[in-house]
Structures are given as C-alpha cells and as structure tokens.
Amino acid sequence: MRIVYIVLFCHFLTAFTALGMPLFMPRMLDSLVEGESQYLIGVMFIVPPLCAALTAPWWGRFADKYGKKKSLLRAQGGLTVGFLLSGFADNLWLFCFGLIVQGISGGTLAASNAYLSSQYKGLALTKSLNLTQCSARLALVSSPIILGLFIQITEPLHIYRYLSLLPLSALLISLYLKNDGTKNKLTNDLENTKQQNTIFTKLLFLQFLFCFAMVVTFPYFLPYVQTLGKSSDSMVGFYYSLPHLVYLLFAFFVGKLVLSPQKQSLFGFSLLGIACIGQFSLQGIDYLIYYRILFGAGMVFCYNSLHLLLSQQLQQHQAGLSFGRFDAWGKWAGVFAGLIASFFAHYFSVHWPFLLSSIACLIAITILITYTKQPLLRAEPSTHNVSKESFK
C-alpha cells in the first residue's frame, strides 16, 4: 500500500473532527454558558487557527530537527488530548483550553505534507499535496452531515469524547509509517538560497491572499443565501459544499495540465474573482449554483499551482519549516478574514465578504503579472515527465 494513502487516511481521521465540529459551536456554547452566548461564537471560532498560526513555524523547526514522522505523531496526539479536554469540559474555560490545545498541538495538514516531502519529490510531491487537500475537502463535505445526525442524539460536547478515537487511531496507524531521516545536507550556495527565500516570500503572499479569499466568504454564507430567496438548510449546505465537491471531482485530473504554475495561478485567481463578483451582485438565487461551480474551479487551479510552486521551492533540510510557514500564513489569513468579514457584514451587508474576496484575488493577479518577467518557478523540463515509479 502506498505511503501517501496511509497518510491521507490518517489526515482524514484528524480533519473530520477539526473541520466538522466548529460548525456546531453555537450548540456547544449554549450548553456551557447561561444566557446569550452569541458574542462568544466568533471568539471561539478563531482560537484554534490563531494558536496554530502562532506555533506552526516552531513545529516546522521541530520537524526538521527531530523528524517529520515524530512531528506527525505529535500533531495527532495533540488533537487527541485537545478533543478529550473539550469533550469533558463542564465550563467555558476548560472548553477554551481544549481549543487552545487543539490549535497549538494540531497542524496535521502541515505535518502530513512535511512527512510526504521526505518521501516524494517534484511532481509526485505536488500530486500528494493535492491529495491531502482532497482528504480535507472530503472531511469538510462529509463531517457536517454525519456529525449533524449524532448531535440530534446526544450533547455536542460529548461527541468530542468519541471523536478523540479518530486522531488516536491515526496515531497508532502512523506508528508503522516509514521513518524519515533527520540529517539533511545543508546548501552552501548563499546566493541561490537568498533567491529561493525571496521567491518563497512571494509564494506566502499568494497563499495568504488565496486563503483569505476562500475563508472571508464562509462565516456569513448562511444568511447570505437567505437574502437571495427562501431556501432550506439542506440546500444552503449544498451550495456551501458545492465548490469542495468540484475540487474532489477534478483535483485528480488537473495534475495532467502542461500549463505553467504561474498561468494556472492567474487562471485560478481570475475564476475565483469572477465567481465572487458574481455572488456579490446577485439579487436572486437562480444563478448561485453556476457561481459556486466557478468558485470550485478556481479552487482547483489555485491549489494545484500553489502546490507546484511549493514543491519546487522546498529545500529538504528545512521542509518542515517551509510547510509550517505556509500553513501559518493560511491560518493568519483565516483569522483576519473572520474578523474583517464580521465588520463588513455588520456595517454594510452579508454580500460584502464576496467583494473583499474578489479584491484579494485582484491583488494576487497583480502580484503574478508584476513578476511575469521574474518567474516564481524555475524552468525544469522534467517536471511534467516524472515517472510513475516516483509516486510509489
């Protein structure tokens, strides 16, 4: 069995709870706080990503020094402890502490990607990074539906107790993964290293803008759809998950494209921007499905291009730090997106987050066009001719 499929399965087990349970934050807070708890929802939502953003680079250095596999086991064990703390919480402070532990000790996506970088290179690594996003999208689509059924049966907080078995199972499975080497050859080419750091910084800005464009439209998606016309909760969930379903359908095929990562990025951000402008200007629900499909297509191209760029800029001796920083910028984007969406939705309308998303896409397109003469990715003729053996 290929290593990548084991890592993907373990990542799905950890992502299922981490991505699904926050949707039911209002229900959990109602059981912990007497009276009005609406004001706490936004705060509790950003606790895990904020803690993850602060600690991700440090855990990346930990992975480079002590091994990617150890860092992966650490992340899975941390989520197990965090879920148990939240599940047995009988007051708001213990619940918040559980969320902090989840944020600080989590980061399973970055840890999984860092481990895969020790096993795969080039296009094979890009494919594996796309697949980890598939496991995340699958968890994001399936977990709200499945967990919603269980929440009708028992208290939401109690579900955390049972769900802690998922990251624990992932930890036990990951113990049998192949060990990675911790000693890596350092490069002495200071000029080349400096150039790579400059390119990687530009890549981090693209990651920030992409994650911002994605997340800023999510918090108020439910009331946004309700302003377009009468729609059931199940239909709102369908519209919400549609872009992720598009990604799951086409992520396996986009790797066959021969377009350069830079052109894929331009195409992806353009599709996202058009989709968000369209959703911002919608007055009825009839055309929403088309813009959601377009949004999903933009996700496919953006993810694939960013993963191509990332895999080509990795230096193995600091792969953990690179993935940690890459993940941290995405988390920071999520934190700022949540805060800014709250402000604009409150003082303007729930349509405005889509305008903010399109502006972020426009800035990303500007960065890509500005550096057309200074390619973000080195030309490597063999990139699209990686043998099938390299992905085994």
Image: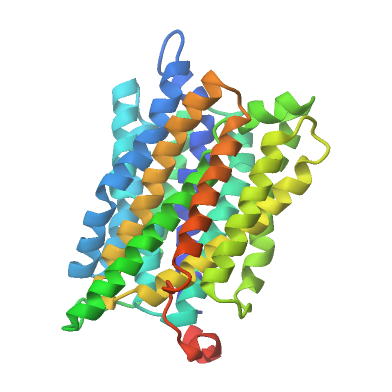
Image coordinates of residue 315 in percent, x first then y, are: 29, 76
Q: Residue furthest right?
A: 286
What residue appears at the point 42 percent right and 71 percent down from the top-left corner? 376
- Judging depth in this view, the residue of 323 and 75 nearest the camera is 323
Q: Position of residue 256 (x, y in %)?
A: 63, 79
Which residue is at 28% across, 74% downward? Answer: 195
Question: Relative to residue 372, is residue 235 depicted above or below?
Answer: above
Q: Specify the quadrant of the image occupied by residue 101.
A: top left
**Residue at point 43%, 56% (across, down):** 207
Residue that sits furthest to the top in the current view? 35
x and y percentages locating residue 389 in the rendered image: 51, 91
Asked where in the image residue 115 lies, by quadrant, the reply is bottom left
Residue 81, x across and y down, in percent:
31, 44
- Vertical comparison of 158 with 204: above or below: above
Q: Nearer the viewer, residue 55 or 325?
A: 325
For this view, does 67 lie left or right of residue 7? left
* Color style of the picture: rainbow
Residue 304, visible in the rendered structure? yes
Depth order, front residue of 182/125: 125
328, above or below 283, in the image: below
Counting labels gives 0
Seen from the viewer's position, the closer of residues 329 and 74 is 329
Q: Relative to 316, is 355 above or below? A: above
Horizontal relation, residue 222 to residue 366: left or right? right
Residue lying at 40% horizontally and 37% vertically, measured from the top left: 336
Q: Residue 13 vs residue 88: left or right? A: right
* Residue 25 in view in this figure: no
Looking at the image, residue 300 sits to the left or right of residue 4; the answer is right
